[in-house]
Image (cartoon, rainbow, N blue to C red):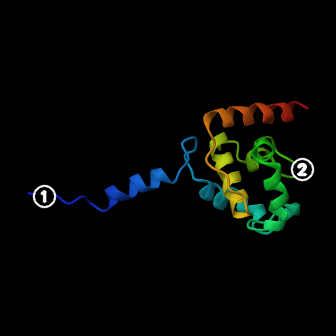
């Protein structure tokens, strides 16, 4: 006799595929809960989500500059968007989500990428 799987058992595996390996929240979820507070409207001159002109320059700078800046804070943006409980992977996922909405084609970072970005962020903080 066949036992059909409950629909809920199919949702969790699909959800796990949408979250980067180094993050517990997706980039979109972090953007919606944290980053959108400034990036949705351009508060304090933050680049507006999806604005390809503003994000184009940042995309060209690359993740090696963008992610450490988000981790350490830059100009009026506090470190990790003011949410120290976010993991480095969650912050990176949010940066990638925003950069890709602005024209980037970035993939999920590796553990080595995250370690390198954390070191660069720590150097920025010590300055």
Identify the residue at horizontal 33%, vertical 59% (top origin).
8
Q: Quadrant of the N terminus?
A: bottom left
Q: Which percent across, then down, holds residue 25?
A: 57, 50
124 lies above or below 13: above
Question: Which of the marked residues, 2 or 1, is nearer the chain's N terminus?
Answer: 1
Q: Quadrant of the C terminus?
A: top right
Quarter of image, res 50 = bottom right
45 lies above or below 64: below
Identify the residue at horizontal 78%, vertical 68% (top origin).
51
Can residue 87 be seen here? The reply is: no
Q: Which percent across, then down, holds residue 112?
A: 65, 32
Q: Which percent across, then down, holds residue 100?
A: 69, 59
Can residue 41 be seen here? The reply is: yes
24 lies above or below 52: above
Q: Circle 1 is placed at which residue position?
A: 2
Element type at mark 1: loop
Numbered-mark total: 2
Q: CA distance from mark 2 to mark 1?
A: 60 Å
Q: Which percent across, then down, holds residue 106?
A: 67, 52
Q: Circle 2 is placed at which residue position?
A: 75
Element type at mark 2: loop
Identify the residue at horizontal 46%, vertical 50% (top origin).
16
Identify the residue at horizontal 34%, vertical 58% (top origin).
10
Q: Nearer the viewer, residue 78 or 10?
A: 10
Residue 122's label in the rendered image is: none
């Amino acid at each position: 006799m066949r036992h059909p799987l409950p629909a809920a058992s199919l949702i969790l595996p699909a959800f796990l595929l949408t979250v980067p390996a180094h993050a517990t929240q997706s980039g979109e979820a972090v953007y919606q809960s944290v980053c959108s507070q400034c990036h949705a409207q351009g508060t304090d001159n933050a680049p507006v989500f999806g604005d390809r002109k503003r994000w184009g320059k940042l995309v060209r700078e690359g993740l090696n500059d963008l992610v450490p800046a988000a981790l350490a804070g830059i100009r009026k943006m506090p470190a990790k968007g003011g949410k120290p409980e976010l993991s480095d992977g969650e912050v990176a996922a949010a940066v990638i989500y925003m950069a890709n909405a602005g024209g980037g084609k970035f993939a999920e970072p590796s553990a080595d990428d995250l370690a390198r970005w954390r070191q660069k962020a720590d150097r920025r903080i010590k300055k």
